[in-house]
Image (cartoon, helix red, strand yellow):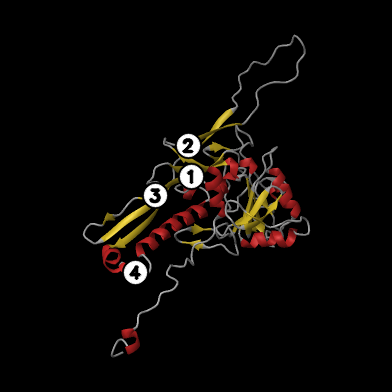
Amino acid sequence: MDPNVNELNAVTLFEIYPRQVEDEFFLSAPLLAYFRDHCLVPFTGGSFMQAPFRYAPLIGGFYAPGSAFNLTKRVTIAALQFDTRYLYVSIPEYKEEIMVENKGEHAVVSLLEADMENGVDTANGITAVALAQSGQGARSLAINGWAEVINDGITPSWDGNVYSTYGLQARNGAVGSTLNSVPVFCGTAAGAAGVIQYSTLEEGYQDATIGRKEPNLGVGNKAVIAYIKEKLVVQQRFAQERDPVWGVMGFRFNNAMILKDDYFPSLKYGQNDPILGSWLTGTFASPGTTANGGTANANSNLPVAATTVTVGEVFAFFNTFDFLFRVTDSEEFGYGFSGFVPEQGSTKVVGQIKAMVNLECVSPRTQKQFYGIGG
């Protein structure tokens, strides 16, 4: 085109409105908000984090007068151990862009501020996705998410993995089943995803209740929250109420506030993002249960061994007061910014948002997960 700019564009400024960058990428993460609000415990230093727990009673019983007591000293206490996990988000900038071009009245939006905001949201997104994953095996650099918490050492979690240890402590050995919570498959005998039932949720809720300790949060992605409302409204009357932590509308199942989390594992709404990670569910081969000739817990309802299990939608009850969300008290490594460092031989400067963060659960038995939900 010659001339390269027409008359109108040559004498007229462009309008930019709204005078902000609208976020069309990041999603809602109420589970992360709950952990930060209820469970944040600063990590003040040390080579690892340790949480002691009791797994057995002392020796005692009825006796006849004059009979000898059993004076054996019994070991009843063990501990969970977690190491530090680190994440980063790099923020590279060119000095020419942030110091020469994007400034003054012509800078409708600060490029630097927009990138810093993106960096914080990216760090939060990575954390939110990792909460539902694990920190074992191929993911040993990631946080110890709830997929390994809500497990019994013999039954696959929603990700298809069995976690025989938690916090470096073996399940089903000396500590028995004290660290166990059995995942529940809600699908069919053929492995397909099934309809969520009120009785399944109620039984799971009660299984995660110990005395006065009840789940206070139920979380799923959009699809499973819709299924619960559609299928269960005839069984339980509920009223919408505003959640005091996340500030959105939810409803209660017994004592648990039910909220939708856009980063929760899902077949319909899940994604596999190269930066944030994957919350897209898939399939795995059932190990069968002890009731049908397999190895998983009979209460998991999994089909016979080698059946392809469709994970579909996932839902979980949490007692968030039994979690510890560990973030260092170091300003730089507590989701803080390192400051910019120049790249040698260029005008590029780079800084990182860094976090030392991990997740501990002091009572896995007060949590419950359900998968194989399709309606």
- Residue behind mark 2: 49
Instruction: Tell me where residue 187 sits by quadrant.
Output: bottom right
Q: Residue at x 58, y 59 (%)?
A: 281
Circle 1 residues within 10 Å: few <14, some 14–19, many ≥20: many
> In 3D space, how far apart are the residues under numbered discs 2 and 1 (Cα atoms)?
10 Å
Residue 16 is situated, as x and y percent measured from the top left of the image, at 41, 74
Quadrant (top left/top right/bottom left/bottom right) for the N terminus: bottom left
Residue 102 in sight in this render: no
Mark toward the viewer: 3 or 2: 3
- Residue behind mark 1: 358
Judge from the rendering whether residue 256 lies leftward or rightward of residue 86; answer left or right: right
> In 3D space, how far apart are the residues under numbered discs 1 and 3 (Cα atoms)?
16 Å
> In 3D space, how far apart are the residues under numbered discs 3 and 4 (Cα atoms)?
26 Å
Q: Residue at x 44, y 59 (%)?
A: 275
Residue 122 is situated, as x and y percent measured from the top left of the image, at 44, 58
Judge from the rendering whether residue 203 lies leftward or rightward of residue 146; answer left or right: right
Q: Secondary structure at mark 1?
A: strand
Label 2 amino acid? Met
- Residue behind mark 4: 107
Circle 4 residues within 10 Å: few <14, some 14–19, many ≥20: few
Q: Secondary structure at mark 3?
A: strand
Instruction: Tell me where residue 270 sits by quadrant.
Output: bottom right
> In 3D space, how far apart are the residues under numbered discs 2 and 4 (Cα atoms)?
46 Å
Which numbered disc, 1 or 4, marks the residue that appears first in the sequence? 4
Quadrant (top left/top right/bottom left/bottom right) for the C terminus: bottom right
Q: Residue at x 44, y 54 (%)?
A: 123
Label 4 amino acid? Ala
> In 3D space, how far apart are the residues under numbered discs 3 and 2 (Cα atoms)?
21 Å
- Residue behind mark 3: 336
Q: Secondary structure at mark 2?
A: strand
**Considering depth in this image, is 112 or 43 the residue closer to the camera?**
112
Q: Is residue 284 above or below residue 211?
A: below
